[in-house]
Image: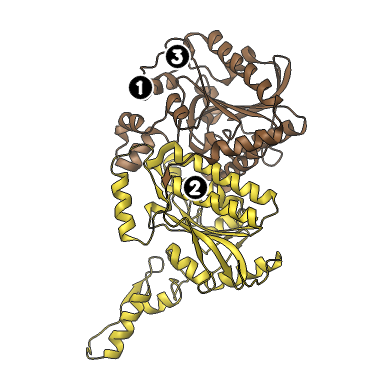
Chain colours: A yellow, B brown
Amino acid sequence: MFEDFFDVVKKRFNGSDDDYKPPMFKCPRCQETSPLSKYEELHRVCPKCNYHGRLSARERIAITADRDSFHEFDRDMKSLNPLDFPDYDEKQEELRESTDLNDAIITGTALIKGSPVVIGAMDSRYMMGSMGSVVGEKVTRAFEYATENGLPVVMFTASGGARMQEGIVSLMQMAKTSGAVKLHSDAGGLYISVMTDPTTGGVTASFASIGDIIIAEPKVLIGFAGRRVIEGTIKQRLPEDFQLAEFMHEKGFVDMIVERRKMRSVLSHLLKLHGFDRKEEV
Amino acid sequence: MDEKKTAWERLQIIHAKGRPTIRDYIPLIFTDFYEMHGDRLCGDDKAIIGGIARLCNRPVTIIAEVKGRDINENKACNFAMPHPEGYRKALRLAKQAEKFHRPVICFIDTPGAFCGVAAEERGQGEAIAKNIAEFMTLRTPVISIVLGEGGSGGALALGVCDELAMLENAEYSVLSPRGFASILWKDASREEEASGVMRITAEDMVALGVAEAIIEEPLGGAHNDLDKISENIKEYLSQKIPEKCKKDIDVLLKERYTKFRKIGAFTE
């Protein structure tokens, strides 16, 4: 995102090209266009309609954690291929090269306005943020670390569900992660689950839905079953707002909807309300 | 036991009309079954039944996904696809079992949790997640048996247990082979091929650490000898339940957590 921004700035100041038009962002929701630089400056929120675009896991942590406070866990963990599924290894190699990731989540410790947390952020660019062995293990280890060290957990979810290519092994990650969340909870730990676009399937049916506090970004997709699957079952079109954050809020499964620009400050307040105040180091 | 059957052949057996359901098994395995109804929040889901019974004289709690034996029964039980209130009823009965120190026996037999508007509105994801988390620390022994279909999260919601047994022809999977072929190959007609790739059989479950035991079916499948298969299930349970009940509950819970904790395939 920053590269794009600097490109714009550079072109502006070099200023030789009179016909230069700044790159524009066309919002997929309202269809309006705005300068890309403005959209990026708002951390990928449409200035016209407040549409919240998707962030990468590293961008998410960069805008949430205090500068230089993030220490990553298990950076080199990579998935094996438990079903020997054709092309799965190749697909992952491609994604590792085209993204800054080894799988669909990064986890670690960080400070949020001085409060120490264990933080995780999923990344929908990596196989739709699906949960296989690595996501399951990293989430589980994050909660276990938090339990051992008396730390709260802030988890940003973005997932299409279970990682089909890992078959039943991916299903079992739901049990593993939810079990670790339960032990953290039983030990008195605070868990704030932040649902971002999209939070569906096996992640909704496991660790995403059992936070002490569940936050969602505006208008993000939250659900168990896919829209098309349900439409196929009931043989009719679903209303536009079905399974959006506001719908789940209305139905009582989301505590609050928080805009991206306010997220860091809301998280900080909630952490402090639970006694996690500024600390010199984690 | 006929070990040469492919996953696809086994799927034909468990989907065939006449495959015994939990309603066939209960009178042959248990005595004094009293069915309990409702989640105390919303309603009574007929896709999951539960209640109290005796297994060889010992009081136990039974929680089971119910398939119908004909179209009318299937309509009534929604083809064994539970809504959130089904999972919440299951959790209520599990908590009741914990209170009265009864072991819990879960019978899994579902294509999956129901995918519909009401299910989403009432929090299908939350209901499943909560069951998984709560069963992980339920302070009483839990044994789960997959009778036929173990479909995805809808099965796992009754599948967090101290020991999982598979009937010989049962399957357990992240999604149906048809769905799998449709998502990954954009071609639902390749379901037979998918069933071969997915590793869904009882032997696969034991190899992957998901299941601990396989309960042998009569030659050709459970439908060929209901008395025999019921006897096999009863024999398995009457050995396992006392064994788990004897264990210190904290040790049991640690082992339960570890069973799931170690499943995963990664390098670092």
Q: Residue type at mark 1: give it.
A: Thr
Image point 45% across, 38% down: which residue?
A169
Name the secondary structure under disc 1. loop
Q: Are marks 2 and 3 on the same chain?
A: no
Which is in the foreground here, disc 2 or disc 3? 2
Image point 57% across, 71% down: which residue?
A264
Q: Residue type at mark 3: give it.
A: Gly
Which is in the foreground here, disc 3 or disc 1? 1
Label 2 sits on residue: A136
Q: Are marks 3 and 1 on the same chain?
A: yes
Q: Position of residue B200 (x, y in %)?
A: 42, 30
How far apart marks 1 and 2 lie (CA) works out to: 30 Å
Label 3 sits on residue: B221
Q: Are discs 2 and 3 less than 8 Å apart at CB?
A: no
Q: Position of residue B198 (x, y in %)?
A: 37, 33
Label 1 sits on residue: B6
For label 3, the crowd category at 10 Å Cα-Cα, with few meaning under 14, some 14 to 19 and many 20 or more, is many
